[in-house]
Image: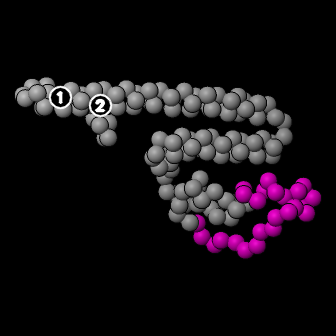
Amino acid sequence: MSLGADVEPVVEGGGSEVIEVSRAFNAMRTRISRYLTERGQLFSAISHDLRTPITRLRLRVELLEDEQLQRKFSRDLDELELLVKGALQCVKDTDIHENIEPVDLNALLECLVEPWLLADGNGRVTQQGEAHAAYSGKPLALK
């Protein structure tokens, strides 16, 4: 059952103790199967409920005239969508499905500090140094 395989009920036969254990096992199998089905439905509903407003916001972002602001909002929505996916995966007790890929650490750091920078360049965050090569990793996990 842990691998998602459908487990057939145990044949109830033999001595009274064997029949009793078989019935208990079959009842447990039914409860676990029902639980897994309901859990899957719950995750699907939560996923849909969280992704609907994100999609609505994406449509509104497309109406923005300022392209720089549009890019910033789109990037934030991408990150929010990945965080929702990651949270659901954590609740499911599985790893976030994210491929290992070359990560531009300079762009990653710029993305992380950008919300804390003020328009005139006198922000509350400074960044020094520069990576000279890409890093193989999972971008969301690094954030």
State the quadrant of the C terminus.
bottom right
Three-letter amino acid code at disc 2? Answer: Met
In terms of image quadrants, where is residue 127? bottom right
Q: CA distance from mark 1 to mark 2?
A: 12 Å
Q: Is residue 131 magenta?
A: yes
Residue pushed farthest right? 120
Q: Which residues are magenta?
A: 111-134
130 in the magenta segment: yes
Q: Nearer the viewer, residue 14 or 66?
A: 14
Please state which amino acid type lies under the numbered disc 1.
Glu
Q: Label 2, on which residue? A: 28
Q: Looking at the image, is mark 1 or mark 2 earlier in the sequence?
A: 1
Q: Locate residue 31, reporting x and y percent.
A: 34, 28
Residue that numbered label 1 is attached to: 20
Between 61 and 57, the one nearer to me in the picture: 57
Q: Using a 10 Å C-alpha cutoff, classify the residue at mark 1 as few (fewer than 14 neighbours), some (14 to 19) or many (20 or more).
A: some
The residue under the point 14% across, 27% down is 19
Q: Nearer the viewer, mark 1 or mark 2?
A: 1
Question: Which quadrant of the structure image shows residue 25?
Answer: top left
